[in-house]
Amino acid sequence: MAQKTTAGFMAMKGSGYYSKATIGAKHVMDNASGMVIDAVDRMRLVDDGSTFRASDMGSADGGTSVDLWRKVLSHVRHKVPSRPIEMIYTDLPRNDFSQVFQMIHGLTDIKSYYDEIDDLYVFASGTSFHQPILPPETLDLGFSATASHYVSRTPCNITNHVHMVGANGDERAAFTAQGARDWESMLLWRARELVPGGRLCLFNFGIDEEGRYLGNTGGVSMFDTFNELWAGLAEDGIITREEYLITNFPQHYRTVDEFTAPLNDTSSPVYQAGLRLERVETRVVRCPFERDFADSHKDPKRFAEEYLPTLRSWSEATFMGGLSADRQPEEKMQIIDTFYGRYQARVAAEPAGHAMDYVHCYLIASKER
Ligand SMILES: C[S@@+](CC[C@H](N)C(=O)[O-])C[C@H]1O[C@@H](n2cnc3c(N)ncnc32)[C@H](O)[C@@H]1O
């Protein structure tokens, strides 16, 4: 079977579900907003009345990054009062962009920054970050959080797992190669878009120096649990073996070496295009639902109920996408509910070790002047 493109089916759960359920992704950005402000300070901006343009690539509904942008854009406003600011949210075409504008214009319960910053213009683009989004040399500050682990297509089915972290041999190698190609194109297009002296701040899921990654920091592995439960549905005849096989997260978790290779290798097209590594580090941000459970309420049922929506907000599209097109939408939804219901029951019965701790690689690059 031909492999699917990610743009053809991928979207976070819409209508504001994503940012409501995914508070941990917000913590990741809030904790790192100082890195973006420092990057702005290193840009040596001139207050010459020209437009300052920023992009939030893979923004989903924009709710998780709102406080980061409040701080960063206020900082820019203060530094260069004469420059109009353009803020551009980007994501794949199926993203719920309406939610971005409802959030910006105060129609949701999220506190927008829009009224706090003068001379601000907000736009959106539904073009993949593996393609050109903006004209050459028009972007001052490119930002993306928790998005570039999505590859543009699944390079092959993974026989024994649903995620590349469980893949072996040639299958693992195919994801690594796809991840390298997509990372290079992400960086190359941004190198073209950035103004000389512009900055890229990319905070991505990855595999850290101790081999940790999202939901795999020493306790129960989240991706192994996904895999066991999805395979269990196949064993129980609820989904077919073919559906199990074609369900693959279109993601590659890169190591720090994989992230930095195109920026360190002086012969790489990315280096040749003028992108330079300024800073790189990994951090682990604790799962807020596990923290509340372990440090405060200690109620397994409540933990399971609060924890599952965060997993579902970003993973549902992949499991839904693995189901046969011959199934009716209601039948698909029933299967998906059964799947997450089993995960929730498992957490409620034996909560110890379950946690979606965030493991990120924080990378800042500059475009040569
Ligand atoms: C886990 S969400 C992260 C949302 C937000 N940046 C955050 O940190 O909370 C990943 C987002 O990346 C988007 N995405 C995946 N591949 C993309 C691509 N090639 N171009 C633009 N957005 C992409 C997904 O549609 C999704 O909205």
Image (spheres, rainbow, N blue to C red):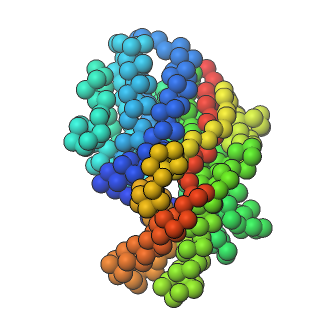
Q: Nearer the viewer, residue 92 or 352?
A: 352
Quarter of image, res 201: top right
Position of the C terminus by quadrant: top right
Taking depth in this image into account, of 274 and 105 the one nearest to the observer is 105
The N terminus, quarter of image: bottom right
Residue lying at the far left of the rendered structure:
107
Residue 50, compared with residue 169, is above or below; it is above
Image coordinates for residue 270, horizontal then vertical, percent = 67, 38
List x then y, in percent, for residue 236: 53, 87
Q: Quadrant of residue 72?
A: top left
Specify whether 67 is left or right of 300.
Answer: left
Q: Is residue 195 visible?
A: no
Q: Does any portion of residue 287 appear in the rendered image?
A: yes
251 versus 328 height, above or below: above
Residue 215 on image: x %, y %: 59, 54
Residue 10, placed above or below residue 22: below
Q: At 57% from the left edge and 17% from the top edge, which residue is drawn?
A: 42
Residue displayed at 56% across by 54% down: 355
Q: Position of residue 343 (x, y in %)?
A: 50, 68
In front of the other: 13 or 269: 13
